[in-house]
């Protein structure tokens, strides 16, 4: 007759017989913030991705363009901010640059590898990350679209209910980060597109449907 042993699964950090549990698994879609549990949202994902690229102590330099032409200028950040700061450009319906049907509003990240952050609160700018790395927060209720050029990388953070259109050129990389898989993604292009949802940090390659 074989004997079976019940294994007591103990949260990490709580001693049991002088031992500690090796790992702890958070509930999916839940994070701890200020000592309390919260459902993971767009804000949590933005903070996570920014810390991963720029470090947890990154200093933000916020820019609120007064005009559409100023916004175009601020979206090109080749040299980067002084003091290793991270430029954050806030766009809304009043300052988001207009574009013609096939025109794109260009985003250029710093050459030293730091990201530029573009926060689209409202409006419908058609953005394209031309080079470097960009974190794009897609929070407009009007619809959201971003292109990624060859050699460029974009981390696109969007709420679960948002419809997001991504066109990624060959040699470019786009990563859609969303609280859940309910985000309505419309992918185009021959570049690499990945999806990350909830608290899962894995980048899952998007499998385009075969018709």
Image: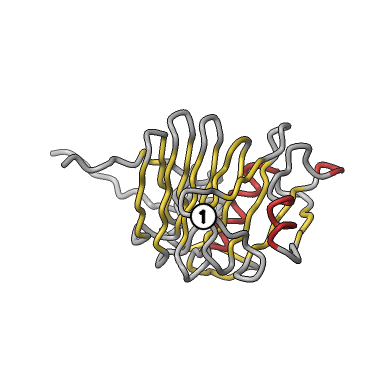
- Indicate the position of residue 107 as horizontal and vertical percent values: 63, 45
Q: Is residue 158 left or right of residue 98?
A: left
- Indicate the position of residue 86 as horizontal and vertical percent values: 75, 48
- Indicate the position of residue 31 as horizontal and vertical percent values: 52, 62
Asked which secondary structure carries label 1, the reply is loop
Q: Is residue 132 above or below residue 185?
A: above
Residue that protrudes farthest toward the left in the picture: 1
Q: Residue at x 73, y 43 (%)?
A: 77
100 or 141: nearer the viewer = 100
66 or 38: nearer the viewer = 66
Residue underneath mark 1 = 100
Report which quarter residue 115 is drawn in.
top right
Q: Quadrant of the N terminus?
A: top left
Report which quarter residue 2 is drawn in.
top left
203 or 151: nearer the viewer = 151
- Indicate the position of residue 117 as horizontal and vertical percent values: 65, 51
118 or 180: nearer the viewer = 118
Q: Is residue 134 left or right of residue 148?
A: right
Q: Residue at x 39, y 60 (%)?
A: 180
Q: Is residue 184 above or below residue 53?
A: below
Image colouring: secondary structure
Residue that protrudes farthest toward the right in the picture: 83
Q: Residue at x 58, y 62 (%)?
A: 120
């Amino acid at each position: 007759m074989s004997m079976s042993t019940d294994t007591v699964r103990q949260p990490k950090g709580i001693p049991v017989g002088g031992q500690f549990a090796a790992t702890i698994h958070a509930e999916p879609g839940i994070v701890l913030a200020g000592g309390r549990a919260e459902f993971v949202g767009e804000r949590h994902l933005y903070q996570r991705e920014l810390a991963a690229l720029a470090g947890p102590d990154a200093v933000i330099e916020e820019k609120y363009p007064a005009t559409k032409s100023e916004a175009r200028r601020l979206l090109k950040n080749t040299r980067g901010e002084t003091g290793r700061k991270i430029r954050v450009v806030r766009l809304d319906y009043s300052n988001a640059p207009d574009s013609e049907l096939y025109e794109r509003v260009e985003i250029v990240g710093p050459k030293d590898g730091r990201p530029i952050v573009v926060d689209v609160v409202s409006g419908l700018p058609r953005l394209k990350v031309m080079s470097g790395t960009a974190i794009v927060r897609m929070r407009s209720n009007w619809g959201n679209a971003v292109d990624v050029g060859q050699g460029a990388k974009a981390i696109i953070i969007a709420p679960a209910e948002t419809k997001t259109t991504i066109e990624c050129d060959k040699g470019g990389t786009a990563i859609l980060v969303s609280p859940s898989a309910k985000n309505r993604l419309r992918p185009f292009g021959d570049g690499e597109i990945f999806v990350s949802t909830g608290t899962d940090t894995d980048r899952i390659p998007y499998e385009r449907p075969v018709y």
